[in-house]
Image (spheres, helix red, strand yellow):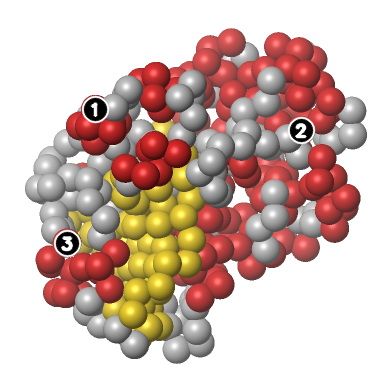
Amino acid sequence: MKRDSDSIAEASVEAHRERIFSIKTPLRPSYQEYFPRFNTWELVDRSRYLPPHLATLLTAPNISKFNSTFGANWWETYCKSSSESRASLLGEVLCHVGYELPVVRAICDTPREVFCHPEVSPYCWLNWSIPSFEGAALSAPGIVAHYLAVASAHATFDWSAALEIGVGTGYHAAALSYMIPQLRIVGVEAIVELAEWAKQRLRSLGHLDIDICTHSIRPKQLLDFAPLDYIYATAAYKSDLTAQASRALKSGGLVTSVRPLRPEEYDASPADIWLKSEWPTYSAYRKQGWNAASVISSSRHTGGVIEQVGDLYGVTFVPWQTEVVSSRHIGRNSALEVLLNQWPTSGGVK
């Protein structure tokens, strides 16, 4: 199932990039620099020269504020539009914040509606996490785009094997397969029913290049899957996987994992931000908040040397299950709930 990527606008928004308002912190780069939450003044200013999808960047909090300020006519039209139209709008947003066309095509040509809960399919092309099977979440496109951008920058023509830790719905693996079709991807998932659900969705799309297995993988077990060109974790670990994962990589391989902030990174955060309001000490953060303010960290393994190639701060991930389980805690998606409760359409969040 493919979409017409030629409709994705990229040059038309180039001139506006320099006027994007961003929430800056000493932690660079932050996910909020790509997709910030705008205050009302910023949103009004952006709406003077940008259409609603680019003014809001299609995030749930920004759309809620936009609807409160300008009314919900655009939102109603958006929700009633075709899946292809909504995918194209998301593509324009991703181009607007600077992602390259191969990454944007991979996101827009992978049908998100197949991987989400049917009741929220009208919203699956928002740049926001969307409910999926049994409380699982379909990652925000901007997060998946970041992973794909890092992989695209370092992939070589002979990449052939990848491992996803925490494959979840299978959507991320499907998008990666679209972008790097020669990859054979193994996805491990600790939640039995979710792994089976992902298998069904991937098979329905003809993905014979992606294998899903139920596994409570621990860092030392990564060698069981070696040799690999790419390892990426889409669940948060309490420790940094980089050193252990690099042992399972071929020379030139890449690892992208989700780790907690380091002490110096926590200390570099301003005293008045929500991080330190919620967890006043680093010890408290490590006990309770480590997965709510995580870092997507990428490193390359070349000739026995680990080279850090990029960090993305300010992200939230589900913790990795340390054992195989038959159910999961159903998390809240408060920003999406606010949007849909205030401006209900034909869909809804259960």
Q: Which mark is residue 91?
A: none
Q: Between 57 and 122, which is closer to the camera in this rendering?
A: 57
Q: Between 319 and 118, which is closer to the camera in this rendering?
A: 319
Q: Secondary structure at mark 2?
A: helix
Q: Residue at x 76, y 13 (%)?
A: 69
Q: Secondary structure at mark 1?
A: helix
Q: Quadrant of residue 149?
A: bottom right
Question: Mark 1 vs mark 2: which is more N-terminal?
Answer: 2
Q: Amino acid at mark 2?
A: Ala
327 left or right, relative to 42? left
Residue 150 on image: x %, y %:
51, 65
Q: Which mark is residue 219?
A: 3
212 left or right, relative to 312? left
Q: Is residue 146 above or below residue 27?
A: below
Which residue is identified by label 2? 55
Give the Cα separation between the discs numbered 1 and 2: 37 Å
Q: Amino acid at mark 1?
A: Ala
Residue 31 on image: x %, y %:
54, 43
Residue 199 on image: x %, y %:
30, 57
